[in-house]
Amino acid sequence: MADEPLVIETGVHAPDACVIWLHGLGADGHDFEPIIPELRLDPGLNIRFIFPHAPMMPVTINQGFVMRAWYDIRTADIAGEPDEKGIRASAELLSEMVDAEIEGGIVPERLVLAGFSQGGVVALQAGLRYQKQLAGIIALSTYLALGDSLESEKSEANAQIPILMAHGSADPVIPVVLAHQSHQKLEQAGYPVEWHEYKGMPHSVSEQEIFHIAEWIEKILI
């Protein structure tokens, strides 16, 4: 990852928890920077938020234009032809970031992976396979890619990892039916999933969703 991630620390003491948050296609690490004050988290939480910037790459569905992306998207059928190599490469980058935070003193059980859209795909890919127990995964406006390999690759350490999934009912980019299928598959695999669907919301984040994210983070980390 060529660019240094954006890092924001909350609380008055040294961070003892960490949230690594991945943006969506064409955005960058600053995309979710404004959400930190909006979360209005308990001031007793000392969290390091890390917002990485995806690498620049040509994206097939966008006429090959070069933009920030965690992996290529080849067709409008997002789930039908996933860029497995790209998804796995970005998941490996994320896992390396997790390793670095653990080496720096954050215990894995207080580390959350979060992602929106493409970023959520990578957060699920990495978190469900990471070999040390993590605090949880936040998957926003996204879906489970490479689900067929999950059974053979999933980490026993994270077999019960809490997952927050949130999606808009009017999402034109990642259809809510795809998120429903992912939610169902995760629950069938034994994962505890908290699901929220927002009526009329497109491929974005709502005020109600921000409240649910904050509530979930506090439940996981306090």
Image (cartoon, rainbow, N blue to C red):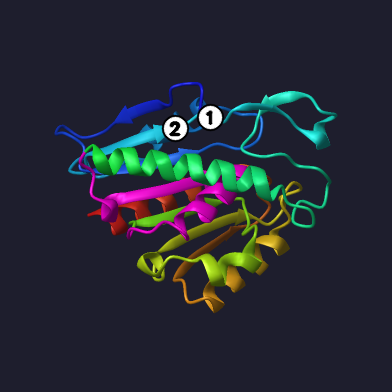
Residue 215 vertical placement versus 103 (above, below) = below
* Quadrant of residue 46 within the rendered picture: top left
Badge 2 marks a residue whose secondary structure is strand
Residue 88: give its label: none
User: Image check: 122 left or right of 131?
Assistant: right
Question: Residue 94 placed where, x, y %?
Answer: 46, 42
- Tell me the kind of residue under disc 2: Phe
Residue contact at pointers 2 and 1, CB within 8 angstroms: yes
User: Image check: 148 left or right of 12?
Assistant: right
Q: Residue placed at 60% from the left, 73% from the top?
A: 184
Residue 31: give its label: 1
* Quadrant of residue 68 within the rendered picture: top right
Residue 92 vertical placement versus 216 (above, below) = above
Badge 1 marks a residue whose secondary structure is helix
| Dot in front, 2 or 1 | 2
- Tell me the kind of residue under disc 1: Asp
Q: Earlier in the sequence, mark 2 or mark 1?
A: 1
Residue tagged by mark 2?
51
Q: Residue placed at 55% from the left, 70% from the top?
A: 152
Residue occupying the far left of the picture: 13
What is the magenta range? 105-133
Residue 35 vertical placement versus 87 (above, below) = above
Q: Residue placed at 51% from the left, 22% from the top?
A: 2
User: How many numbered marks appear?
Assistant: 2
Q: Residue placed at 48% from the left, 77% from the top?
A: 190
User: Image check: 69 left or right of 13?
Assistant: right
How busy is the neighbourhood of tag 1: few (under 14 within 10 Å), some, or many (20 plus)? some
Question: Residue 98 placed where, x, y %?
Answer: 37, 43
Residue 222 vertical placement versus 56 (above, below) = below
Question: Residue 133 placed where, x, y %?
Answer: 32, 60
